Amino acid sequence: MEQKMELNVEIGKRVRQARKDAGVNQTRFAMVLGLSRGSLSNIESGRQALQYEHLYKIAEVLGVNVYDLLPPLNSDSSVDIFKPIEQLPRPTKEKPIKCPVCRSKDVALIELREGNGVLGPGFSSWVTDSYYSCHSCGVRFDKIPKP
């Protein structure tokens, strides 16, 4: 929870600075975004999370890149939005899948996902369809062929 607040504060600072650099006051900027001045003030101070559609609108209105409003991945700040690599699950040793057509081992599982429409903390997605695809010959198949 604390990391989320730190991220909100960092993004809020960047939004405030971009707005000031553009010479726009809070009241007018909030009106253009369809927010109350209080909501914009809360976003800029990190007390309120910025919705992603507003992030894109802010970047568009101020003429900046969306990435300029987000902290860099190599930031020295205490905001750590990604797990260190050591904490990620290690891949299991699985036997490579052979393509039933060309016998290549260049086969990948393709998962089609849907999500709740929110990227970031709290994002969830689920698999709606999956299939295997051979990168060598392009064939698509649903089940792993038996040797």
Image (spheres, grey):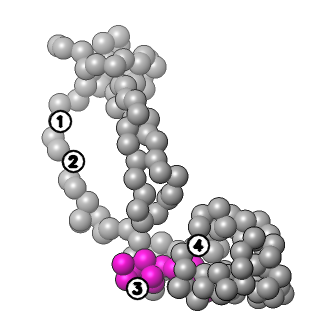
**Of the residues shown, which amino acid type is indicated by label 4?**
Leu
Please state which of the two labelled residues, at mark 3 or mark 2, is closer to the viewer: 3
- What mark, if any, has residue 78 been given in the picture? 3
The residue singled out by tag 2 in the image is 91
Circle 3 Cα neighbour tier, 10 Å, few/some/many (<14 / 14–19 / ≥20) = few
Mark 2 lies on a secondary structure that is loop
Q: Nearer the viewer, mark 4 or mark 2?
A: 4
Q: Can residue 22 be seen in this view?
A: no
Q: Is residue 66 left or right of residue 134?
A: right
Counting from the top left corner in percent of width and height, residue 45 is at 58, 89
Label 4 and label 2: CA atoms lie apart by 35 Å
Give the Cα distance between marks 3 and 2: 29 Å
Say which residue label 1 marks: 94
Determine which residue is flagged by label 4: 50
How far, Cα to Cα, is label 2 from label 1?
9 Å
Q: Type of residue at label 1? A: Glu
Q: Which residue is drawn at 22% across and 55% down?
A: 89
Judged from the image, the secondary structure of the residue bearing numbered disc 4 is loop
Element at label 1: loop
Image position, residue 37 (x, y; %): 72, 84
Q: Main secondary structure of the magenta part?
A: helix
